[in-house]
Image: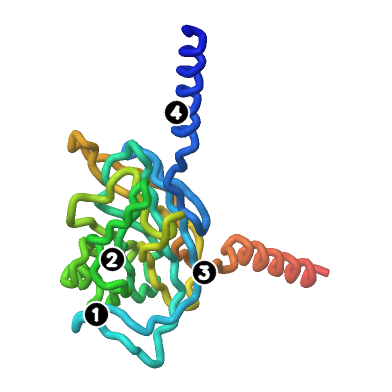
Amino acid sequence: MIQNHLVKLSLSSLLLFSASFSVSALTLQRGTETHLTGTLGDVQVNYVDDTATLTGYLDSTGLVTGVNPGIPEKRVQYDLLNNAGNGSIFTFRVDYTPGTTVIGASDPQGFYESDGTDQNYWGGEAYTTLFDSGFGVYSYNVANGGEWEIDYQSDHVTWTQLGNGFFADTATGLTEFGFNTTFALSFAPDTTLGLMPAVVTGNLVTGAPVSASGMVLSAVPAIPVPAAVWLFGSGLLGLIGVARRKV
């Protein structure tokens, strides 16, 4: 009797262990994976670039659709997973080289919880915010019910969450549960892409400020002929000319 009872307990413990071990974590499903790390914790970013055409956007007049011809763009999307145990994220900043032509930016329309629940109260319109008023803060999507404000500057864009934050153990973008419109930057079609700094900031449950940083895909300078090579070539040609005159 005692042995049978112990066997039943062992089997029950094994089944519970197996069930807990088999629970899959929330995952991002596309793009190139990188990680922002720091006092906030580990934040996974998957970036995806493509060429697209804007046929609808938000500008100072409101929502504009059916744009023909559309605006060609080189787009980079950023799917974010705020891992379990982290603080809540309130800002996400991506840098680019000064002088870059930035057409606009998109902000998240929702996020997935670890059990697959799709929360979409973040979202306004699922359209790109057009930077039609120069540098400064754009709240076009906030006016349409969104919770993200976009600050456009000469060398970076910062998305700021105006609600309760981007919680731990949630993700935006493409997950195993589906897709939500996510963070994105729209550049001119001829923009050169490479790795640039990115940072998230937020708060712990204690209220203490925290951050995490790393590198993501963004706009970088086009690669010129290195000055050192040009100078070396000029110097070499000069020496050849001198040698010929002496002969």
- The amino acid type of the residue labelled 1 equals Asp
User: Dot 2 corresponds to which residue?
Assistant: 153
In which quadrant is the C terminus drawn? Answer: bottom right
Q: Is residue 177 above or below residue 204?
A: below
Q: Is residue 148 above or below residue 81?
A: below
Residue neighbourhood size for the residue with mark 3, other residues' Cα within 10 Å, grouped as few (<14), some (14–19), many (≥20): few
Residue neighbourhood size for the residue with mark 4, other residues' Cα within 10 Å, grouped as few (<14), some (14–19), many (≥20): few
Which residue is at the far right?
247
Q: Contact, CB < 8 Å: mark 1 with mark 2?
A: no
- The amino acid type of the residue labelled 2 equals Gln
Q: Contact, CB < 8 Å: mark 4 with mark 3?
A: no
| Precedes in sequence: disc 1 or disc 2 | 1
Question: Quick one: SS at disc 1?
Answer: strand
Residue 117 image point, x, y percent? 33, 53
- The amino acid type of the residue labelled 3 equals Ala
Which residue is rendered at x = 49% and y = 67% of the image? 49
Question: Quick one: SS at disc 3?
Answer: loop
| Precedes in sequence: disc 1 or disc 4 | 4
User: Dot 3 corresponds to which residue?
Assistant: 222
Residue 15 image point, x, y percent? 48, 28
User: Dot 1 corresponds to which residue?
Assistant: 59
User: Dot 4 corresponds to which residue?
Assistant: 16
In the image, 243: left or right of 161? right
Residue 74 image point, x, y percent? 46, 74
